Image (cartoon, helix red, strand yellow):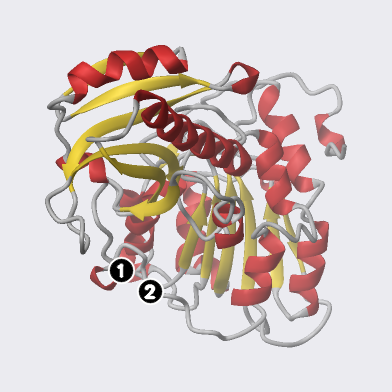
Amino acid sequence: MYVPAEWAGRKPGPKHWTEGARGDDPAAREVHAPTGSGIGDGKAFLFLFGYKTAGTQDPGMMAAELDEIGDDVAVLRAAGYTVIVDRQATREDLLDAVTGAGGLVPAGIYWSSHGGPDGSLECCDGTIVSPADLDAAAVSAALRLVIFGACYVGAYAPAWRTALGGYPLVAGWGRPVTLQRAVDFLEEGRDADVGLDDLIQRWLLTDAPIPPDPAGPESALPPAAVASGRIGRLRQRIPAVAERLGAEWTEHDGHLDVTVPLPGGRTHVVQVFLTDGTDPFAEGVTLCGMEAEVGPTSPLITPERLLAASGRPGYGRVALVAGPTGVPVVVTQSFTPLTGTSTQQLAAHCYRVALHADALEFRVFGTDDA
């Protein structure tokens, strides 16, 4: 694993600095001139790492990512881009990058750091930056791609895109991810995934139009089915279903949460509820609905990854529903008539919804948060 030479024997520094002093080391910023000419002529791509300089874990995380970006730097330089790699990026560095301060014309930015559940980004000096800190009117219209390698931030992509003037495609993780998933994204040639090399190839090596904001009115999605659910007769049915599954359950307004045990000591929560059928030949039929969340979607998640197991015979489906931050949320669902469906069949539906959601969650994010 590559580790910058200046980290050898380095003692952890303070998280905050005295007033008026820099919170970063200017020498940690490297500028790589173009090696060729092409679509990137006169433009820049910035790799900004906002990991804190204090502590011992963050430098190792950044080193793992730095070890994977060499091929991307080379591709960008060959296409005419000036590439900046800043290993100690501050709040001001990001604000300057998006506006093109210093004469740079930013076409793309990769920012990597810790992210907050509110969609904010941590910086190397302990400061925080959020969409509210940006002036949309000052953002460079040349900006086409912004990637946030930070937990949670992808779930706030619409807010960030608005703050960035509506110009760039904004991609990122909508939930916590493991370091391995973050490194996988940077690894060259991972055919099953959308990686950094794919995004660069599609949006920075061509002039293809940037797709519209997925949270826009033209991309409206239905709310989660559980939002209009009710409990009704499920109170009498669910104890036997939970017993078959070895599951625990709790009651909430309009639905029941069933925590389903899965192989490997994992679990996943399935929301179980009643709703009314609206499809032809099923109008008004009382359906038992089951829904489990996988997580927010993003340009980093391919349809192939979501639908890989959907062709097998069995219960359940994968769906996209409206999310609370404007980003579509991936869920697994199953619906079956309550009347005439046995306890065994209800348990089978519930288990399949939980297992499918958990497998997708682990495949995409590498975590077990549901």
Q: Quadrant of residue 281?
A: bottom left
- Residue 112 in picture, x, y percent from top left: 60, 45
Picture residue at 83% right of the left edge, 34% below the top: 6
Location of the C terminus by quadrant is: top left
Residue 49 shown left or right of residue 225 in the figure: right
Q: How many numbered marks, from 0 up?
A: 2
Q: Quadrant of residue 232?
A: top left
Say if residue 27 shows up in the picture: no
Percent across and percent down for residue 251 are 21, 18
Q: Please tell me how crowded label 2 is: few (under 14), some (14-19), or many (20+) other residues with Cα within 10 Å.
A: few
In front of the other: label 2 or label 1? 1
**Which residue is more in the foreground, 243 or 205?**
243
Q: Amino acid at mark 1?
A: Ser
- Label 1 residue SS: helix
How far apart are labels 2 and 1 at the CA level? 9 Å
* Residue at 59% across, 21% down: 14
- Lower position in the chain sequence, tag 2 or tag 1: 2
- In the image, residue 322 sits, relative to residue 39, either above or below, namely above
Residue 219's mark?
A: 1
Residue drawn 40% across the image and 45% down it? 331
- In the visual, does 16 lie left or right of 3? left
Q: Quadrant of residue 282?
A: bottom left
Q: Residues within 10 Å of mark 1 (few under 14, many from 20)?
A: few
Judge whether residue 129 can be spotted in this image: yes
The answer to which of 366 and 254 lies nearer the viewer is 254
Q: Position of residue 369 (x, y in %)?
A: 48, 27
Residue under circle 2? 212
**Label 2 close to label 1 by CB (< 8 Å):** yes
- The image shows residue 360, relative to residue 187, as above or below, that is above
